[in-house]
Each structure stands twice: as structure tokens, then as C-alpha cells.
């Protein structure tokens, strides 16, 4: 073994240790950002609304919840499909409600509008029962 090989092999562990400490410093510095992202995700998860069959919509983005029976609702659905803004969350079941999202998307749901409204405002139900 030559002297140059001995030197590089002795230096390599020191370089690895420095690189590892730099990685730990970067990870420690980015952990508050990761924590903030996790907090945001958990806050958004609390605002998610189940529209049936495990499909979720961000509750703060819902503009309207409507019954699909009327002719204007049928036209709304057809126009959204033509613009590629229709999301079918019925899983093959009958459409019972149409949700309009602020991004101009239209979501079809197999859950009734009354049920979705109750899921949006669960506190209102508890307050109504207390006063009645």
C-alpha cells in the first residue's frame, strides 16, 4: 500500500462524517417547514367533506349544493362535461346532488343535498336540537 492510498483512506471517513453532519443540519433546518406542511395538511383534512364512497372535497371551496332534477342542473352538468370540468363521484350510482366548486368544477354525488349540508354544518344540528 502506498502513502497516497493510506492518506485517502484515512481522510475518507472524516469527509463522510462532515457530509453526514451537513445533511443533519439541513434536515434540522427544514423540519419547521415540514412541520408547517403537516399542520396545513391536518387543517385541510379537517375541512374535507365526504361526498360519498370515500370521495372527499375541500369544504371551503364548495359554492353550491343542488338537487339534479331540474333542467338547468342537467344543462350545468352537460356544459361542465364539455369543458372537462365534471367530476363524477357517484361510483355508478344515481346522482342525488350536484356540487359546484369555486374553481368552476362540478361534482356529482350519490349523497343527498340534505345529508351533505348536515355534514358541512354538524354544529347547527346540535344547536337546533338543544333549542327545540
Image (tube, grey):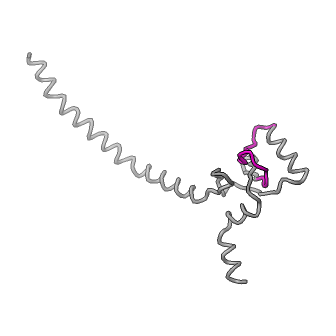
Q: Find residue 132 and report its horizontal and vertical position in percent.
A: 73, 83
Question: For residue 79, what is the image quadrant?
Answer: top right
Q: Quadrant of the N terminus?
A: top left
Looking at the image, the residue that sits furthest to the top is: 2
Q: Horizontally, is 82 left or right of 15 in the view?
A: right
Please give the name of the residue rendered at 27% of the width and 38% of the height, measured from the top-left corner.
Answer: 20
Q: How many marks?
A: 0
Start-end of magenta stretch:
82-98
Q: Horizontally, is 1 left or right of 19 in the view?
A: left
Does the magenta segment cover residue 97? yes
Query: Principal SS element in the magenta part?
Result: loop
Q: Horizontally, is 94 left or right of 29 in the view?
A: right
Q: Find residue 106 and report its horizontal and vertical position in percent.
A: 76, 47
Q: Find residue 110 and report its horizontal and vertical position in percent.
A: 74, 53
Q: Is residue 23 above or below residue 45?
A: above
Q: Horizontally, is 60 left or right of 19 in the view?
A: right
Q: 94 or 118: nearer the eye? A: 94
Q: Is residue 73 above or below residue 22?
A: below
Does the magenta segment cover residue 14? no
Q: Is residue 44 above or below residue 132?
A: above
Q: Find residue 125 and report its horizontal and vertical position in percent.
A: 69, 73
Looking at the image, the residue that sits furthest to the right is: 71
Question: For residue 51, what is the image quadrant?
Answer: bottom right
Please give the name of the residue rendered at 22% of the width and 37% of the height, measured from the top-left corner.
Answer: 17
Please give the name of the residue rendered at 71% of the width and 46% of the height, measured from the top-left corner.
Answer: 91
Looking at the image, the residue that sits furthest to the bottom is: 131
Amino acid at each position: 500500500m502506498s502513502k497516497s492510498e493510506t492518506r485517502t483512506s484515512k481522510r475518507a471517513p472524516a469527509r463522510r462524517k462532515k457530509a453526514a453532519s451537513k445533511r443533519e443540519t439541513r434536515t434540522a433546518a427544514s423540519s419547521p417547514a415540514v412541520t408547517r406542511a403537516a399542520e396545513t395538511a391536518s387543517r385541510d383534512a379537517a375541512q374535507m367533506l365526504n361526498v360519498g364512497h370515500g370521495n372527499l372535497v375541500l369544504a371551503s371551496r364548495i359554492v353550491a349544493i343542488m338537487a339534479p332534477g331540474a333542467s338547468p342542473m342537467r344543462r350545468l352538468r352537460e356544459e361542465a362535461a364539455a369543458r372537462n370540468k365534471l367530476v363524477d363521484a357517484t361510483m355508478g350510482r344515481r346522482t342525488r346532488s350536484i356540487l359546484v366548486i369555486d374553481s368552476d368544477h362540478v361534482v356529482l354525488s350519490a349523497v343527498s343535498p340534505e345529508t351533505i349540508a348536515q355534514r358541512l354544518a354538524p354544529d347547527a344540528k346540535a344547536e337546533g336540537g338543544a333549542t327545540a
